[in-house]
Each structure stands twice: as structure tokens, then as C-alpha cells.
Image: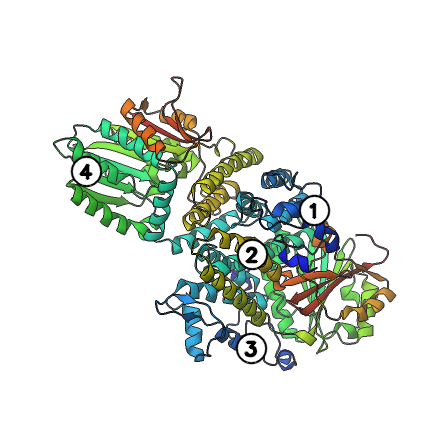
């Protein structure tokens, strides 16, 4: 499945080489939580420079002195003298791709990382082995989830309330195209603030869908969905399932009038609403968090390596059985409970009032898989189910809260 | 909830009441034999592996169920099983977890029709990181801990030396996956057996990628060793393995005054099934005095059109192979890891890729093994079997004694079969044979 996502890269390639790969908008940069954005990334890279002992072998140690930025970049990107450096550079690149929702680049890097990694090698090789495996597992399971979610549907209408580059959808297309039962129609209505961007996104998605032989329509809706008065374009067609994907950004307003949005949801009665809310009270860049974890486990593996011999079977078992699982948890799902407010409580009442009830994201795997549509599990490290919501977090910090809602009179 | 951190199994978000399971799932970290994954499977659903505390072969059951679901196109079942396998698998865990990892990758690619793409990516990545040193380490270590490959070497060398005895100009055409590790022993024998040391020309038929990555060093070492042994020696490389059926005497540099031996170890299975008979015919045109064939004892060919049957056989063979690897190598062996990765690609090739029929989705390589009996049927079209002499059989027995218990030699009973079988825990695993025109 990893490789299937690669297909996107040739087709999803941005036609404008000058435009930024990052889907983040400029106004996000001014957010309190994100203000140190780029700077934080560079800091993270510098912090993760390897020290070297006299024999030239790379070792990972704690906070190193901040090196000149160019030198730091070169070490990580070119790989210096050690394949360990190169390996971790690749892993960082992969993490960066994941942080920007660039799944196809991420999955393109993973095979090489996996090949270079080994649970029986140097510290970086061992750390990379478990992180890469965890990332791969996550990408695969998220693809499976989406696939499964749409299995039963022949006609789907996705309304993405903040589509931007639409990078989250090609993976879904590929899954739909691979189904044995052909989907009859797939349409995406993308809402956004710039009609140019929307049209470019639409063209890209259409091209990709065509290349897969997928019947596809794209509709651009400029503006804020809460302010829309003419709903005819959003109206469901016969036998069509409507799914609303809604990523909230608390510090800026994309949907416009809340009441308007609610009214819309009430009218549309989508089969599924997926809501992802960013908990900005504890925000931080993915990359920073990922690097922190990498740092932590590298130091741990290093320490284990010093304490026990190179070929220590015990060390391997501890790393594989204990830390491997921890890392998997961190990159993926599960983990200790999070504290942090559940912002969706605010919406809970509203949604209930207009006739929706929450679908618990606990429960058996099959049902759960079907509800991951549109979410970003591959971006999360700890995903914990609490009161029916999924909370995405990093160690003790809650980053996102996700919930799903369906009409009260419907059973899943 | 604190106990969750120390639980070696991943704690799934689908378990809404972890406390309740905390007690059930508590795992004794000191019990290394317990596959951690089996803990998870018991609380999943009724498809889980039987006894979590026993030697449950949970991987085989889940994998077979999934293969069956694939052949029946039962999408939701496929996804459910792949989901579970994905959660439980690990390429770095125990045997069950490894099998789950490699086989579920193949099933996933088959389900999403991404087999060729995935295989090509994995192959090119492996090729990029391959070096002479790494390949050499892997092969030599494997030979040190297991007779899996050396069995074929000793049998073949023995048959070749006997067939070419007395000849002065020898030409061995080597179509193998052995990286020439079998030849030093032969060179030594040539140098010491008789008073007259014959000339040896060695022509290695391989792939372009192998030539690029390892042949230069192999050539240097072989030439140096031959010099040391005092054997007049020539080394040639023909990087046309995938055109084997069409190669000619001229392309292989076969001359009329040479005594030719053809050595095929683990090579015939890499030829596309539809070309195999043609290859046998081509070998005959070279006029060899002896053809030695060594292959692994598995059948991925006759069931090509029956996915479940092919899957079962593939799983049977590789479960055995992985178990053998686990028992032969140290637990922290990088060499074993490399071998496992090769297996992973082979499994992908057999289960998720179509045989080359000219389509854009086909792979050049095959990995479709056939059993000794099947190769016999093919080879009998142009050759007749030569039994191994008692001396050679003794040499093989002596070889096996150098390894751990569990390995033995089986001679075929009837007239139909020919060749020798290497068995591991009573299962025939490798077949070696010799043929003459």
C-alpha cells in the first residue's frame, strides 16, 4: 500500500514549482502556538546533531552545541561519514513529509529507511528500525480504514470544509479505484477562501482520478460554508452518501457563521461528519515532537548499547518488545490517557440539538476503521479514546480531538 | 493505566475499557517465549489464535484466512484480517510476527494490485544498499551455520570433478546464486587431485544488477585464488540471466575443444515458468559433459492459478525456512535479517506479481520454485540422470556432520527420481542432482 501511495507523486506533483509544498497558510504562521514554526524546526534539527567519538563513529548524545546552520543541514542531508547520520536524516525527512500531509513522499522514503535500518546495528539503525516500522504500520492501517469505510458505498459526496491542496484525498482515490466493486460516483466539494487555489486543487484531483479510471466530479465553493445560502449544490443526489470532513482551526475562522454551518449540517444530514479540532493550548510542530521522541529513544538505545554488549540478546529483546511497542504507540495509536480539554463539548450540544449523535470511537475494530475516514491517524502519535472521542496527543500533550457524528435516527 | 506502558503489546484504541483488560493482558516480561502479539488477538474477536499461552501458530491461521478471503473477494473480511495482521506483525519479532509481516505485505499488495510496484521499489532499494562486503558476509555466515547451501556445493562439485576427470581444458558455466563461493574448493581439488592440473575457464551468467554490484570483487578474488592454487584460470561474466533461453554457445564463449559443465544452483527457478523448457533445450546445445541442478524443495508453480493453494505452499515452505534461520543463527544476526528481507521480496514476487508475459506489470524475475520431481520431468526431455557416486555421498554426509543436529541426507528410492535430498527435521528442503545428455 505504501507503494500505491507513490503513484500520487507523479500525478499530484505541484504544477507550480515555485509554490510552497507546505499547505499551511500564511495566516497560520502568526498563531501563538505556531509562531516559532520554522525556527522551531531548525532548532529541532540542530538539537539532533550527532556527536562523534574520536574513531569517527556517530553517537547520539544529549544537547549538543548549536552548530552553524549550514553545517548542520549538510550533516543531516548528506549524511556525513556515517550511514547512521544518513539514516536519521532520512527519517527526519520522512517525518517532515508526514507533518505536511505529504503521504506519498513519506511512503517513498520508508523502503530505503527500512533497508538501512536494523534492530541489530548501531543506535541510529536500531531506533530507525522501530520508528520506520511504526510509521509504515500506521500508513497501512489508515489506508485500510478508509478503504473499509467506503466499502459499502457506491456514491459518495465528500464535503471538505477546508480542502486547501486536497493532499488527503488521492490516497482515498487509489483505494476506491482498487476496490473490486466499482464506485459509481465520487464527488468532492471543496470549500476554501481562494477560488484559484480551489480550481487548481480540483484540476489536480480530477487528473488523478481520471488516471485511475475513477468517475469523479469536483466542485469548488469559495467562501465560508457557514455563510452559504444556496445549498442546492451541496444537496445529496439519490442513493448518495454524504460525508462532511471538518478540520477546525480555532484561531481563525474558516466556516464563518457557526449557526449557518449548523443549519447546513442539519439540512444535509450527512451520513458521517468527521471533526478534527486543533487543541492549540498545547500546540507544537509535529516535527519538533517527532524529533524529541527520536532524541529520547536514541539516547535510551545509546545508553543500553553502552551498558550491554554489541550482540546482546537481552538488549534486543528489551528494545523490540518494550521500546518497539512504545514507539509504535507514539507514532500511532494507543498510549496513556491524555488530559486536556475536550473542545468538542462545545459542539456536542449543538450537534445533538440538530439531530446528530456521537458515534463512539471506541468499540470493535471494524466499526472504528470505518470512522477514520478523513482523519489523519498517520500524523498522530498517541491516539486515545476518551468519552467516545479520539484524542491525538504527544506524550502528555493533547494536540487534536477528533469525533464523529451521525444522524440520531441512523444506525451504523 | 500506568501498567499500559509496560505492556509489550500495542494497546489499541479500540479497547475502550483498558483497565478491565489490564489484568488479563499482563505479560510476564521475563517469559521470552511468549509471543506478545497473541495477547492482543484473544480479545479481538473469534478469529483470534487459539491458546495465547501455547505455541499458537496465530500467524498461519490469520494469513490463511486472509488468503481465502482474497480469493473469495470478501472485502470486509480482507480488511479486517489485514488490519489485525498489520497490528500484530513485526519484521523484528519472533517467527510468527515475521511471517505475519512478510506475508501480510504480500497480501496487502495483492489486494491493492500494487505487487509489481512494491517489488520493484524494494528490489531497487536493496540493490542500492548491496555491496560485495555485505553480500559476502551474509553468504559466508549462512554457510557457516547451516548446510542449506553448502549441501548443493559439495554434491555439485563432486559430480563435476568426476565427470570432467582427465580433461585438460575445463569450462564451467555457472548459473547460480552462490556468488562463486563453491569454486575455491573445486579449484583446490583440481590443483591437488591429479598430477596434471587442467585449465579452468569459469563463465558466470548473472543479472546486470549483480554484475554492477559484486562481480568486480568476485573476479579479483577468484583470479587471485586460482593463482595461489596454480590453476590456469579465466573468468568471464555474461549478464544475461533473463535471456537464458536464447543464449548461444558463442555468447557463452563455449569452444569445441572444451569439456563443459553447467552448474545451476538456485537459478532455474528465477526463469519465467514458460521459458523453462526452452532453457533446458538451450543447455543441451552447449554439449555439456554434466549438468548439475540444485533447487529448493517447494512448489509454487503447479498451483499458479490457484491462489489459496499456492499461498498455503508458500507459507509452508517459508515457515520452515524462517524457523531454520531462527535456529541456526544468533538472535541478533544482521546476516539473518538480510536473508529474511530477500525472502520477503520472493514472497511478494510469488504471491502478488504476475509472471512476465510482456505486460507492463510483470516482473523480470520469477521466484516460482518447483520440486525436484518437477525439474526431473523437465530435464528428462534432454538429459538423463547421473547418480552421485558413493564418494560424493560420503562427502555430503561428512559435511552434514559439521553442523547442528537436525540435518540429514535422503537418497531417492525408486528409479523415477534422481538426486539427493537435504532434509531438516525430516522435511526435504533442498534437492541436488546431476545430468548428462
Q: Nearer the viewer, residue A340 or B78?
A: A340
Q: Chain of mark 4?
A: B
- Marks 1 & 3, CB-CB < 8 Å contact: no
Observer-side mark, 2 or 3, equals 2
Q: How far is disc 1 from disc 3 in space, using C-alphas? A: 41 Å
The dot on residue B44 is 1
Q: Badge 3 is on which residue?
A: A40
Observer-side mark, 4 or 1, equals 1
Left or right: A183 in relation to A260? left
Q: Badge 4 is on which residue?
A: B200
Residue A215 in the image, given as x and y percentages of width and height: 65, 55
Q: How far is disc 4 from disc 3 in space, using C-alphas? A: 65 Å
Q: Nearer the viewer, residue B114 or B431?
A: B431
Q: How far is disc 2 from disc 3 in space, using C-alphas? A: 27 Å
Q: Badge 2 is on which residue?
A: A324
- Per the image, label 1 sits on a secondary structure element best described as helix
Left or right: A15 in relation to B153? right
Q: Residues within 10 Å of mark 3 (few under 14, many from 20)?
A: some
Observer-side mark, 1 or 2, equals 2
What residue is shown at x 47% (from left), y 75% (from top)? A64
- Per the image, label 4 sits on a secondary structure element best described as strand
Q: Chain of mark 1?
A: B
Q: Chain of mark 3?
A: A
- Marks 4 & 3, CB-CB < 8 Å contact: no
- Marks 2 & 4, CB-CB < 8 Å contact: no
Quarter of the figure with residue B182: top left
Q: Chain of mark 2?
A: A
- Per the image, label 3 sits on a secondary structure element best described as helix
Residue B12 in the image, given as x and y percentages of width and height: 67, 54
What residue is shown at x 23% (from left), y 50% (from top)? B220
What residue is shown at x 53% (from left), y 56% (from top)? A319
The answer to whether residue B374 is above or below residue A268 is above
Amino acid at each position: 500500500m505504501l507503494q500505491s501511495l507513490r503513484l500520487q507523486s507523479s500525478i499530484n506533483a505541484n504544477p507550480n514549482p515555485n509554490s510552497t509544498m507546505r499547505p499551511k497558510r500564511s495566516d497560520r504562521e502568526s498563531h501563538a502556538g505556531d509562531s516559532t514554526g520554522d525556527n522551531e524546526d531548525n532548532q529541532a534539527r540542530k538539537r539532533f546533531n550527532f556527536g562523534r567519538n574520536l574513531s569517527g563513529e556517530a553517537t547520539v548524545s544529549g544537547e549538543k552545541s548549536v552548530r552553524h546552520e549550514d553545517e548542520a543541514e549538510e550533516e543531516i542531508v548528506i549524511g556525513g561519514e556515517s550511514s547512521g547520520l544518513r539514516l536519521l536524516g532520512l527519517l527526519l525527512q520522512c517525518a517532515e513529509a508526514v507533518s505536511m500531509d505529504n503521504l506519498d513522499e513519506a511512503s517513498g522514503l520508508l523502503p530505503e529507511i527500512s533497508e538501512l535500518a536494523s534492530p541489530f546495528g548501531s543506535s541510529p539503525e536500531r531506533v530507525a528500525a522501530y520508528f520506520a516500522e511504526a510509521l509504515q504500520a500506521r500508513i497501512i492501517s489508515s489506508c485500510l480504514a478508509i478503504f473499509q469505510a467506503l466499502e459499502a458505498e457506491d456514491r459518495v459526496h465528500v464535503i471538505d470544509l477546508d480542502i486547501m491542496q486536497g493532499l488527503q484525498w488521492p490516497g482515498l482515490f487509489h483505494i476506491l479505484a482498487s476496490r473490486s466493486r466499482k464506485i459509481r460516483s465520487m464527488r468532492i466539494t471543496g470549500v476554501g477562501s481562494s477560488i484559484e487555489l480551489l480550481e487548481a486543487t480540483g484540476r489536480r484531483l480530477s487528473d488523478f482520478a481520471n488516471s485511475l479510471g475513477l468517475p469523479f466530479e469536483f466542485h469548488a465553493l469559495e467562501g465560508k460554508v457557514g455563510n452559504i445560502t444556496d445549498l442546492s449544490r451541496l444537496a445529496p443526489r439519490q442513493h448518495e452518501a454524504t460525508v462532511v470532513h471538518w478540520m477546525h482551526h480555532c484561531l481563525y475562522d474558516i466556516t464563518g457563521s457557526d449557526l449557518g454551518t449548523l443549519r447546513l449540517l442539519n439540512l444535509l444530514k450527512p451520513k458521517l461528519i468527521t471533526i478534527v479540532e486543533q487543541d492549540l493550548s498545547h500546540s507544537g510542530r509535529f516535527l519538533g515532537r517527532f524529533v524529541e521522541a527520536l532524541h529520547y529513544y536514541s539516547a535510551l538505545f545509546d545508553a543500553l548499547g553502552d551498558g550491554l554488549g554489541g550482540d546482546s540478546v537481552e538488549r534486543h529483546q528489551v528494545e523490540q518488545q518494550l521500546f518497539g511497542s512504545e514507539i509504535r504507540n507514539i507514532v500511532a495509536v494507543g498510549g496513556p490517557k491524555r488530559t486536556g480539554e475536550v473542545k468538542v463539548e462545545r459542539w456536542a450540544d449543538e450537534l445533538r440539538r440538530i439531530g446528530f449523535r456521537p458515534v463512539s470511537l471506541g468499540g470493535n475494530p471494524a466499526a472504528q476503521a470505518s470512522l477514520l475516514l478523513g482523519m489523519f491517524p498517520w500524523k498522530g502519535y498517541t491516539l486515545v479514546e476518551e468519552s467516545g472521542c479520539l484524542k491525538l496527543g504527544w506524550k502528555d500533550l493533547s494536540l487534536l480531538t477528533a469525533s464523529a457524528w451521525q444522524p440520531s435516527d441512523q444506525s451504523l | 493505566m500506568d501498567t499500559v506502558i509496560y505492556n509489550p503489546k500495542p494497546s489499541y484504541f479500540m479497547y475502550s475499557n483498558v483497565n478491565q483488560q489490564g489484568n488479563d493482558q499482563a505479560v510476564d516480561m521475563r517469559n521470552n517465549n511468549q509471543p506478545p502479539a497473541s495477547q492482543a488477538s484473544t480479545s479481538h474477536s473469534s478469529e483470534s489464535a487459539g491458546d495465547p499461552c501455547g505455541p499458537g501458530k496465530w500467524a498461519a491461521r490469520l494469513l490463511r484466512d486472509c488468503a481465502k478471503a482474497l480469493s473469495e473477494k470478501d472485502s470486509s473480511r480482507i480488511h479486517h484480517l489485514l488490519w489485525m495482521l498489520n497490528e500484530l506483525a513485526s519484521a523484528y519479532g519472533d517467527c510468527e510476527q515475521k511471517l505475519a509481516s512478510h506475508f501480510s505485505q504480500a497480501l496487502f499488495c495483492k489486494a491493492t494490485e500494487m505487487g509489481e510496484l512494491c517489488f520493484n521499489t524494494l528490489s531497487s532499494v536493496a540493490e542500492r544498499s548491496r555491496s560485495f562486503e555485505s553480500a559476502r558476509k551474509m553468504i559466508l555466515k549462512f554457510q557457516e551455520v547451516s548446510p542449506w547451501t553448502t549441501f548443493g556445493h559439495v554434491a555439485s562439485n563432486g559430480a563435476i570433478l568426476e565427470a570432467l576427470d582427465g580433461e585438460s581444458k575445463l569450462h564451467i558455466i555457472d548459473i547460480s546464486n552462490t556468488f562463486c563461493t563453491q569454486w575455491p574448493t573445486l579449484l583446490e581439488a583440481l590443483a591437488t587431485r591429479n598430477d596434471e592440473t587442467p585449465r579452468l575457464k569459469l563463465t558466470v551468467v548473472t543479472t546486470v544488477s549483480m554484475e554492477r554490484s559484486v562481480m568486480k570483487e568476485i573476479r579479483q578474488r577468484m583470479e587471485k585464488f586460482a593463482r595461489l592454487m596454480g590453476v590456469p584460470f579465466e573468468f568471464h561474466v555474461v549478464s544475461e540471466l533473463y535471456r537464458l533461453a536464447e543464449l548461444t554457445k558463442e555468447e557463452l564463449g563455449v569452444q569445441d575443444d572444451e569439456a563443459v559443465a553447467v552448474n545451476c544452483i538456485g537459478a532455474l527457478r528465477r526463469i519465467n515458468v514458460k521459458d523453462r523448457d526452452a532453457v533446458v533445450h538451450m543447455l543441451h546445445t552447449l554439449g555439456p559433459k554434466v549438468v548439475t541442478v540444485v533447487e529448493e524443495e517447494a512448489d509454487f508453480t503447479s498451483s499458479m492459478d490457484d491462489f489459496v493453494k499456492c499461498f498455503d505452499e508458500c507459507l509452508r515452505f517459508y515457515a520452515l525456512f524462517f524457523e531454520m534461520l531462527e535456529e541456526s543463527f544468533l538472535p541478533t544476526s544482521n546476516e539473518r535479517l538480510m536473508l529474511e528481507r530477500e525472502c520477503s521480496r520472493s514472497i511478494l514476487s510469488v504471491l502478488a506479481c504476475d509472471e512476465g508475459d510482456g505486460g507492463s506489470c510483470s516482473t523480470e524475475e520469477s521466484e516460482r520454485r518447483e520440486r525436484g520431481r518437477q525439474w526431473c520431468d523437465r530435464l528428462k526431455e534432454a538429459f538423463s540422470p547421473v547418480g552421485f557416486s558413493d564418494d560424493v555421498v560420503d562427502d555430503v554426509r561428512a559435511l552434514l556432520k559439521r553442523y547442528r543436529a537436525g540435518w540429514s541426507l535422503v537418497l531417492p528410492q525408486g528409479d523415477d527420481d534422481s538426486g539427493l535430498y537435504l532434509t531438516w527435521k525430516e522435511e526435504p528442503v533442498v534437492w541436488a542432482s546431476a545430468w548428462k545428455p
